[in-house]
Amino acid sequence: MLFDTDVLIWMFRGMKKAAQLVNATPKRQLSIINYMEILQGAKNKFEQVSYKHFFSHYHFDILPVTEAISHRASILIEEHSLSGGLHVTDALIAATACEHRLTLCTANQKHIKSIAGLDFKVFDPGDSSSAE
């Protein structure tokens, strides 16, 4: 399963439901785009290193942007940016999921729900209970 940045942020903020989902997933993937978004959101170098250690320790596969992913993302932008507000980062993440035939787990389906061929699982953060 390819995890979107929002699900990981919920987990890092202590949401038990997000942590349980990540822990229960045997094959965890990230687009390099998600990885960079997480690192960019770090408050300091220690937090960046902690994120990197987490992804390594939990054996996340970090998937690069390839020529095929770039091409698919550009088509998605043409098809969905005007009508659905699809942004470049979301297009690259969706294209990564499509190219690798992965399910994208995201809490933000607004911009991706109309993408043909994209398999996605909606993460509902509605229960805001924190990890103990």
Image (cartoon, rainbow, N blue to C red):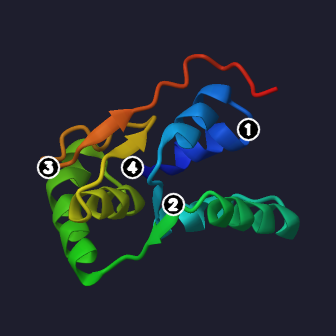
Q: Which residue is identified by label 1? A: 13
Amino acid, disc 1: Arg
Task: Of the two numbered discs 4 and 3 on the same chain, state the one appearing first in sequence.
Answer: 4
Quadrant for residue 48, please give it.
bottom right
Q: Is residue 123 above or below residue 63?
A: above
Q: Which residue is identified by label 3? A: 117
Q: Which residue is identified by label 2? A: 34
Amino acid, disc 2: Asn
Give me the C-alpha separation between circle 4 and circle 2.
13 Å
Tell me the residue at 48%/70% (across/down): 32
Residue 37: x, y in percent?
58, 61
Residue 113: x, y in percent?
24, 37
Task: Of the two numbered discs 3 and 2 on the same chain, state the one appearing first in sequence.
Answer: 2
Q: Residues within 10 Å of mark 1 (few under 14, many from 20)?
A: few
The residue lying toward the viewer, choosing from 85 and 110, is: 110
Amino acid, disc 3: Gly
